[in-house]
Amino acid sequence: MHRPSDAVGDTELTYAFIVFYRYRTMSTEEAEKAREFWTDFLKGDWPSNVRIVGNYKYAWGTEWNGFLLIEAESAHTFFEFWPKFRDKTRWYVDNTRTIIGQKT
């Protein structure tokens, strides 16, 4: 079985991550705190080598509240970032599901 490499010739592959998320039930105050946290996190702690291509508020037809479309030049970069991100958002994000693909 052929396993794709991280590079084809001189062209690097880009990894895409579709991250579906579901919020916990929150009070109005908690929801405001979550919005403030997200804004601050994007400005200060989000790594430059993990790009948000899209932040979608709804995922109609599913049980998810929305999803992020994220790109990184390597899966390793994303997998280093992900546990830190989940630790910081766990208090208001109940669950996530991630789909991974490669852009060629």
Image: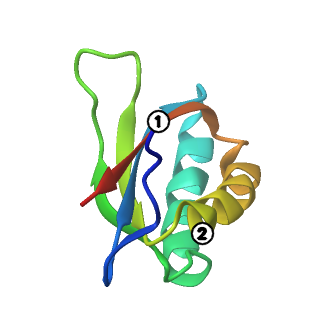
Q: Which mark is residue 55?
A: none
Which of label 1 and label 2 is nearer to you? Answer: 1
User: Is disc 1 placed on a helix, strand or loop?
Assistant: loop
Question: Is label 2 in a helix, a strand or a loop?
Answer: helix
Residue 18, image x, y percentages: 38, 44
Query: Which residue is outermost to the front?
Result: 1
Label 1 to label 2: alpha-carbon separation = 25 Å
Mark closest to the chain's N terminus, 1 or 2: 1
**Residue 2 spot, x, y in % from top left:** 43, 43
Q: Nearer the viewer, residue 102 or 83?
A: 102
Q: Residue at x 60, y 69 (%)?
A: 77
User: Which amino acid type is shown beneath numbered disc 2?
Assistant: Thr
Identity of the residue drawn at 62% across and 44% down: 30
Residue at 31% x, 78% y is 9
Quadrant of the snapshot with the C terminus: bottom left
Q: Is residue 52 above or below residue 65?
A: below
Which residue occupies 57% across, 52% down?
34
Kindly identify which residue carries mark 2. 77
The amino acid type of the residue labelled 1 equals Met
Q: Which of 101 and 6 lies nearest the eye of the viewer?
A: 6
Percent x, y for residue 70? 39, 58
Q: Position of residue 25 (x, y in %)?
A: 59, 25
Q: Specify the label residue 1 is tagged with.
A: 1
Q: State yes or no: discs 1 and 2 in contact (Cβ < 8 Å).
A: no
